[in-house]
Image: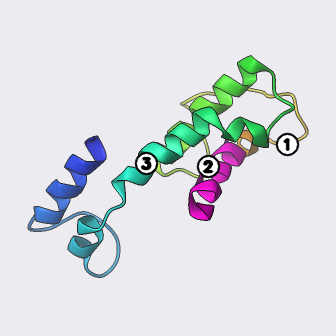
């Protein structure tokens, strides 16, 4: 709901925020419904991408992946949460795997 409100506000704004050419067209067609689907996938289905995690580790990775998606980040900021998954992958890779799994699943549908 928040993304719908923001997209409507930005589309009607005199100087909408954003990058590139016509920002107003971007905000008018903003796919806000996808946000819910992606977050649901992160918390419901994406755990299949990392079956080696414990339940506790999975919950932390899901929260980190959702944070990355909501804020449009490619890495978890050091101030947010440092968690060692004790795996051969670096600690940003595991939440990123969940994030990309959810994005790819949405594209495939």
Residue ID for mark 3: 35
Question: Residue 23's quadrant in the figure?
Answer: bottom left
Residue at the right extreme?
88
**The magenta segment:** 95-109
Going from N to C along the chain, the mark reached first, 1 or 3, is 3
**In magenta stretch: residue 61:** no
Residue ID for mark 2: 102
Of residue 68 and residue 103, the one placed in the foreground of this image is: 103
Q: How far is disc 1 from disc 3 in space, using C-alphas? A: 27 Å
Q: Main secondary structure of the magenta part?
A: helix
Does the residue at mark 2 contact the one at mark 3 (Cβ under 8 Å)?
A: no
| Rendered image: mark on residue 41 | none
Instruction: Give percent across and percent down for residue 26.
Output: 30, 71
Residue at (74, 45) in percent of width and height: 93
- Mark closer to the observer (2, 1): 2
Question: Residue 86's quadrant in the figure?
Answer: top right
Residue ID for mark 1: 89
Where disc 3 sits, the SS reads helix
Going from N to C along the chain, the mark reached first, 2 or 3, is 3
Question: Coloring scheme of the render?
Answer: rainbow
Residue at the bottom extreme?
21
């Amino acid at each position: 709901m928040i993304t719908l409100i923001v997209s409507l506000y930005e589309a009607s704004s005199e100087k909408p925020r954003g990058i590139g050419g016509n920002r107003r067209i971007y905000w008018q067609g903003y796919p806000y419904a996808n946000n819910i689907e992606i977050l649901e996938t992160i918390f419901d289905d994406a755990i299949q991408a990392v079956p080696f995690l414990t339940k506790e580790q999975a919950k932390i990775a899901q929260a980190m992946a959702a944070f990355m998606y909501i804020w449009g980040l490619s890495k978890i900021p050091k101030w947010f949460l440092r968690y060692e998954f004790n795996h051969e992958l670096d600690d940003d890779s595991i939440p990123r795997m969940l994030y990309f799994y959810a994005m790819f699943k949405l594209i495939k549908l």
